[in-house]
Image (cartoon, helix red, strand yellow):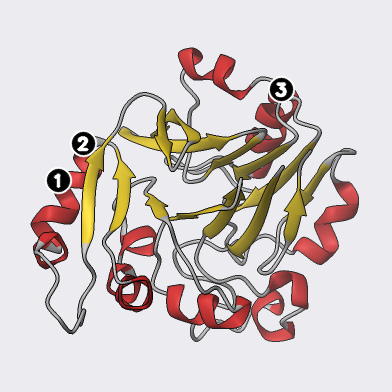
Amino acid sequence: MTSVLVLGAGSSAGTPVVACTCPVCTEAHPRNLRSRASCLIEHQGVQLLVDTGPDMRTQMLREKVSRVDAVLYTHPHADHLNGIDDLRAFCFRQQQAIPVYGNPFTMRNIEERFGYVTLPPTAHWERPVLTLNPVEAPFTVQGVTVTPIPLLHGNWPILGYRVGKVAWLTDVSTIPESSWPLLEGLELLFLDCLRQRPHHTHMSLDEAMVAASRIQAQQTWFIHMTHDIDANALRTQLPDGMDFAWDGLRLTTS
């Protein structure tokens, strides 16, 4: 059994957007309150965090998360990485280094920008202590198999992840042909859906629906949405089996 907690379903600016007066931002319907995209996947008792955005601390407090066994990084953009320092609370609580995974580019980026996280711990555990693991093929975390899904974010090669029958694909504009077989037999698909208009580095709503129809997961939940997406209004127009995710959404597979 695999459970998924959506920590954040929003894009880089979040929704509401600072200083925006559009109806989605000002009316603040619960389905349109979106912090930066992240999730917590639990499989066989192992808790895997996907990305550490700038809202990480607030998300963890909101959901009362008390343990992180590993972090799966999709790519090093600020809205997916810059909350990395808040991992120190889990390192302190668990009194051990946390392994983090991502493609070689992402691991190099972390080492260059946040090199202090690779230093040995002190007696005070006053900073994150992480082990960096470049991955390009399936790997295991405490016996749990994690399959990286190669994706394109514009021209950038990034990773989605599959654990059991769950896949998290954020910030994707193109799914390479070789990655489609890795997405067969899903129960839950979380898929990038930035806005209704086309974008050069993300899937639009129409593009996301086409991709979801091809993948044929039992249920598809759209993520990484800007304030252009009024989830409360648009969800009634989606095909069966598709919906917009929201912060705090919890789901479980067989």
Residues at marks 3 and 2, CA–CA distance in whole angstroms: 28 Å
Q: Quadrant of the N terminus?
A: top right
Q: Are marks 2 and 1 in contact (CB under 8 Å)?
A: yes
Q: Are marks 1 and 3 in contact (CB under 8 Å)?
A: no
**Residue at point 56%, 58% (across, down):** 40
For the residue labelled by badge 2, is the local secondary structure a helix, a strand or a loop?
Answer: helix
| Disc assigned to residue 185 | 3
> In the picture shown, does residue 114 fall above or below 27?
above
Could you say where residue 26 lies in the image, as x and y percent from the top left? 68, 85
Q: Residue 77 at what x, y percent from top left?
A: 31, 55
- How many C-alpha atoms fall within 10 Å of the one at disc 2: few (<14), some, or many (≥20)? some
Which of 24 and 250 lies nearest the eye of the viewer?
Answer: 250
For numbered disc 3, what is the local secondary structure?
loop
Q: Is 217 positioned to the left or the right of 43 in the image? A: right
The Cα–Cα distance between marks 1 and 3, rounded to whole angstroms, is 33 Å
Secondary structure of residue under mark 1: helix
Q: Quadrant of residue 98?
A: bottom left
**Residue 38 at what x, y percent from top left?**
51, 59
- Depth order, front residue of 97/165: 97
Which label was assigned to residue 104? 2
Mark 2 and mark 1: span between their CA atoms? Answer: 6 Å
Q: Is residue 22 left or right of residue 68?
A: right
Q: Which labelled disc corresponds to residue 186?
A: none
